[in-house]
Amino acid sequence: MDGEEPLIDEGKELQLISAAHPLIDKKTVVPVNISIGGDYSTLVVTGPNTGGKTVTLKTAGLLVLMAQTGLHIPVSPGSRVPVYENVFADIGDEQSIEQSLSTFSSHMSNIVEIMEEADDRSLVLLDELGAGTDPTEGAALAISILESLAARGACTIATTHYTELKKYAISTEGVENASMEFDVETLSPTYRLTIGLPGKSNAFEISRKLGLPDEITDRAASMLEGGDIVFEDIISAIEEDKKRAEAERDEAVRITREMKIRQDELEAKARKLEEKTDKEIRRAREEAREIIAEAKETADEFREELKEIARLESMGERTKRFDEGRRRLRAIEKKNRNTIKRETNDKPVDPDMLSLGDRVKILTLGQNGEVCELPDEKGDLQVQIGAMKIGVNVTDIMLIDQPARKAASGRKTSNYGSMYRQKAQTVSTSIDVRGKNLDDALMDVEKYIDDAFISGLGEVTIIHGRGEGILSKGIRAALRKNKNIKDYRRGAFDEGGDGVTVVKFK
């Protein structure tokens, strides 16, 4: 049976999880969840005929008795079973021809015996309680029997078709509804038990599906009391809401599971990327250490060689040794340059199109700066990065920001244009006023700002030092009044920090 050892509850709570009837084929049996004895001691099970109500009663009784005889039972782990002194059952149609007893009388004879002995250590199973007599009287009698069993402390599971018992379970503390699901579309039961929700008999719907004319079922519906119709409609609405909620819950669980898988994948990729990055950094550091060590060794060798060259008397021998040294240096430079991964420049820079203040990226360093000295005939130029000037070749830069310039080809330029070119060729991207008094510094900065703006520089640096802050405060106060300045800021850590002010023009 693939049985499990149930937990023995010292109280009265019976909780069977995915319980299966032990005599039904495991391939076809539908497990049910049955619980009683906790928040409620009476469970009213409703639903259509052949829907599994009786099988549920028998499953509860059989598994309780099996557990109390020491057998494992077909349930899921975590199931709990109390020890009952008696298990009473009134199940099935036991009409006696010999004793000329009707179905109702037969049931009632069993119930009389049960009522004589049931107590707070009893499990009572009642099938179709109150059936076989007038529905109104049968329902009233059934409610009275359930109340009496509850007063004795017995745990009772009863099946019924009566709407009055469904209402009783809803309005009475310690009593809970349960229902057996039924698929009206396929006219087949699902055999699943739902605790907390009363079931519908579905008599009208089943009759229509089987071909009973609509006028008959409509007339039957009109004969029901208005309250009963509303109650059945409420049950239908609750069932639909429950199915929709279960579908949404299943969808939420599926999405959560997929998101968890996706999150695990992303975290794994992030870990791999971090490991790869760390590996690349370690490799780059090792290469840098090797290059530095080689440079130091080369410098030591050339220092000694220069001493030897200085002792040579022949100029030809000296020249020959110098040429050999230059070839060795070029070879070392070429080798180390090849180890640097530089960004590819898809748009080579035309030296004639460069102007002072153009923003460029130095590909070999991966740093941005401004052109502060135009290229010579070899294409070598100076680029300022913060407070540093770096010498590079035009082939090692990429233009990233070029101020708009008006083409003047074939036209005479104005005096302003000549002054613009003159300023552009002479104005630096920084000015140093450290050590000056505030008045002299302000005069120099004011003239420098005007020249830099005329030359078309986008950004300049004023180096005033830290000191007591007199220069920095005075200069920044003057900058606030200049209409040509877009904004200014203190220098970054690698630009000089509080010792500099970086100005950006409109």
Image: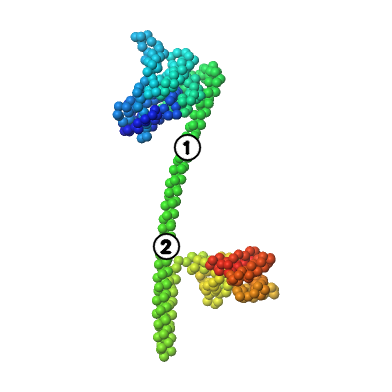
**Residue 209 visible, this orientation:** no
- The image position of residue 447, as x and y in percent, is 67, 73
Q: Amino acid at mark 2?
A: Glu
- Disc 2: which residue: 280
Residue 187 shown left or right of residue 353 in the figure: left
Residue 9 shown left or right of residue 386 in the figure: left
Q: Residue at x 37, y 30 (%)?
A: 10
**Residue 315 visible, this orientation:** yes
Relative to the observer, which residue lies in front, 379 or 492?
492
Circle count: 2
- Disc 1: which residue: 249
Q: Is residue 168 above or below residue 401?
A: above
Q: Is residue 403 above or below residue 204?
A: below
Q: Secondary structure beneath disc 2?
A: helix
- The image position of residue 435, as x and y in percent, is 61, 75
Neighbourhood count class around disc 1 (C-alpha, 10 Å): few under 14, some 14–19, many 20 upward? few
